[in-house]
Amino acid sequence: MMTRQQICILGSTGSIGTQALEVISEHSDRFEAYCLTANNKIELLAEQARRYKPACVVIANEDKYEDLKALLDDCPDIKVYAGAQALCEVVQAEPIDMVLTAMVGFAGLAPTIAAIKARKKICLANKETLVVAGDLINDLIQEYAAPKRGVHGASIIPVDSEHSAIFQSIVGESGNEIEKILLTASGGPFRLKTLDEMKSMTAADALKHPTWDMGAKITIDSASMMNKGFEVIEAKWLFGVDADKIQVLVHPQSIVHSAVQFRDGAIKAQLGVPDMRLPIQYAFTYPDRLSMSGDRLDFFKQPLEFFEPDLKKFKCLALAFEAIRRGGNACCIVNAANEIVNLAFRQGRIGFLDMGDIIEKTLAKATAIQKPTYEDYINSDNEARKIAEELL
């Protein structure tokens, strides 16, 4: 019998995590959930634990520990842990073959680093890990890439649909120079809105994404196009391409998930219906492809359109490019400020356009560090959050 791959899902109750569990269900002969984690959603986490019977579960919010333990009181074989440190420890468990990092935000950085040091395969869906500390993560991947004592070396396979598409486009192209990465964006719900109209947009308006079903934080980031800015930063570190070789294309249909142009002018793209299960499954199975249920792309049903993004309307995207230009801890500052303003907008405390303005002011005020250490990233994150809060 085939040995089933043991998977730890950081953020199993979110959009990526729940779809990853669907993939595990469809290929239960190949995959098994070893550990499931969540931040606050104990009811859903307990429900998932009962269905998939992992060895353990972790709730990041320690205040929820006793309630989660009570919900799983009749499941003595499932160990229950809590806290940020538990997340970092569980990813190092010897049976785990791969870690799907589907947590949202800066909180995903520490457990990802712990998993890399344990030489695990990282299926990366937490874009903030590379946005905040791409240089550090790349150095760690190189340091822990070699197998040791029978453990496969650390590696990263991207899960974001755009980065998975780029990754799939360069498979088999080793040694061929990338001339340009064509990073597609849906444009979000406000693509056709004017600046004046965007001033009055609410969180409820921003959460109505035209093509993707995502969590609230990422959906707001998509509406502001900060999500795309983060993906530009992530692509720079994943594929070793300078930002000036990454072009953002607004593609409302979300059929072309991204493409790569090579130095001979040839362009390779990955296309498909908007379904995150495909990049999740590909990350699990690479370099193999397995069957997957679901819709198939019909080229006759709709046109494929592409537009240039408006950087005046979408200041957040422009700020991401500015952070790349500055280097050092600038991307960390932008990410921290964005987490603050994103939440404030969802709570109705600021307007939609205020988000970009506050991020811009935070970047100007925060301490710049050109060669940050891990501790510098932690301090920069804290400082930027405080500045952004004061600016609200």
Image (spheres, helix red, strand yellow):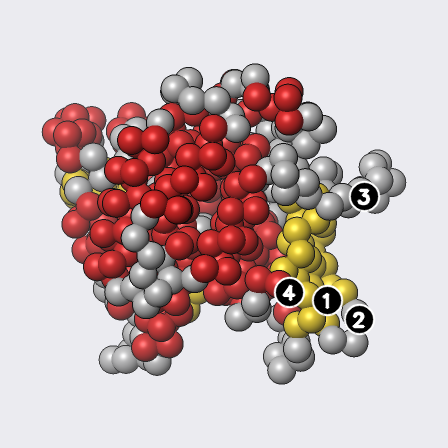
Q: Which residue sits furthest right?
A: 300
| Quadrant where the N terminus is found in the figure | bottom left
Q: Please give the name of the residue rendered at 38% of the width and 62% of the height, measured from the top-left corner.
A: 328
Q: Please give the name of the residue rendered at 39% of the width and 67% of the height, measured from the top-left corner.
A: 135
Read off the residue under disc 1.
Answer: 261
Please tell me whether mark 2 sits on a helix, a strand or a loop.
loop
> Which tag, 3 or 1, sits closer to the chain's start?
1
> Which tag, 4 or 2, sits closer to the chain's start?
4
| Quadrant where the C terminus is found in the figure | top left
x%, y% of residue 31?
Answer: 42, 54
- The amino acid marked with disc number 3 is Leu
- Residue 265: image tag: 2
- The amino acid marked with disc number 1 is Gln
Please tell me whether mark 3 sits on a helix, a strand or a loop.
loop
**Mark-to-mark CA distance, 3 and 1:** 18 Å
185 sits left or right of 230 in the view: right
Mark 4 Cα shell of 10 Å, populated few (<14), some (14-19), many (≥20)? some
x%, y% of residue 35?
Answer: 29, 48
x%, y% of residue 356?
Answer: 49, 36
**Mark-to-mark CA distance, 1 and 4:** 10 Å
Read off the residue under disc 3.
Answer: 304
Q: Observer-nearest residue: 33 or 275?
A: 275
